[in-house]
Image: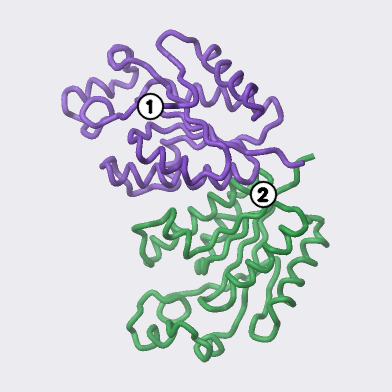
Chain colours: A purple, B green
Amino acid sequence: MAPRGFTLWFTGLSGAGKSTLSQAVAAELQARGHRVERLDGDEFRQRLSRGLGFSKEDRDENVRRIGFVARLLSRNGAVAIAAAISPYRELRDEVRRDHESRFVEIFVDCPLDVLVKRDPKGLYAKALQGEITNFSGVNDPYEAPTAPEITVHTERESVAVSRDVIVRWLEAQHLI
Amino acid sequence: MAPRGFTLWFTGLSGAGKSTLSQAVAAELQARGHRVERLDGDEFRQRLSRGLGFSKEDRDENVRRIGFVARLLSRNGAVAIAAAISPYRELRDEVRRDHESRFVEIFVDCPLDVLVKRDPKGLYAKALQGEITNFSGVNDPYEAPTAPEITVHTERESVAVSRDVIVRWLEAQHLI
């Protein structure tokens, strides 16, 4: 029997910990023998979305493309792990609807004021000063999920704790 | 043991039979229990390459994207079947180099004069009259493979014969 594929879709603000957490989950699932493919929003923009910017239309198109590839991978038995801000609820729901395999939305929740304080790359500072526009959560919308399968709170949980919350949920759902 | 994935890359002029033949091969491999994903050039342009045209630069980017997705699928155990004109040798070779799994180039060969005579969509007529520009083989280059793994001759072989040539080659290589 070939394994069942599914998609883990990490959504959240810039700096909330989507990439780090998705890497930790990917490592754990790989160690358990799953075929895992990470689709990181930033890398994806270089490989499949060159030329797209950060307008709503371009963001939507980028999310649609990540969703399309996640759908292909997961319906072929892989675990597709997408980590992208994906700020618009409607687009995340569209990607969910298009999936033939299980779609698991994971809200990587971290309060904006914590992100502004951390700000390792100085992006929030620039956005607050208006030097960066279309920055989700500052001068562009971020629509938090209303009914995600899983929510993790990265301002008060370690990466290991958030990872285990996700892994235990997947076990309980018999996905792994 | 999870199955080994690989990529079948059909290249050839418009109307040579890439889509039809790739569908026939996909059906046969599916019937044998393989996970198969077809990446059709035309559908791909709508899903992942909206906004790209037919200049060399845009064609290259489109082929790169198909190659990227084929690579992800095949390294996760699926058979990725790409059918796209992919007229430039350098780009096909780049996609081949990027692959971690086996890359099988299939030249769907059909003489231009036969295609011009058939021309069910009237595209060659329009290209010859200059109504369509950047049409591979007429007013845009098509660089035939110099060392494809497989060549099929659709002007004198039935779809079933070409399909069987490919399937037997894959058997001989122990890919299926």
Q: Is residue B140 above or below residue A72?
A: below
Is residue A45 among the parts visible in the rendering?
no
Q: Nearer the viewer, mark 2 or mark 1?
A: 1
Q: Residue at x 49, y 59 (%)?
A: B63
* In the image: residue A21, left or right of residue A36: left
Q: Chain of mark 1?
A: A
Crowdedness of circle 2 by 10 Å Cα count: few (<14), some, many (20+)? many
* Camera-nearest residue between A81 and B133: A81
- Which image quarter: residue B26? bottom right
Q: Chain of mark 2?
A: B
Count of marks overlaid on the render: 2
Task: Indicate the amino acid at tag 2.
Answer: Ala
Is residue B50 among the parts visible in the rendering?
yes
Q: Is residue A137 above or below residue B44?
A: above
* Percent coordinates x, y for residue A164 in the rendering: 58, 16
Q: Residue at x 76, y 72 (%)?
A: B165
Could you say which disc has been placed on residue A113 in the image?
none
* Percent coordinates x, y for residue A70 in the rendering: 52, 42
Q: Secondary structure at mark 2?
A: loop
Check chain identity for marks 2 and 1: say if they share one. Answer: no
Q: Residue at x 52, y 15 (%)?
A: A162
* In the image: residue B64, left or right of residue B133: right
Crowdedness of circle 1 by 10 Å Cα count: few (<14), some, many (20+)? few
Q: Secondary structure at mark 1?
A: loop
* Camera-nearest residue between B135 and A65: A65
* Residue receiving disc 2: B78
The N terminus of chain B is located in which quarter? top right
Task: Indicate the amino acid at tag 1.
Answer: Thr
Distance between mark 2 and mark 1 Cα atoms: 34 Å
* Percent coordinates x, y for residue B143 in the rendering: 53, 72
* Residue receiving disc 1: A146
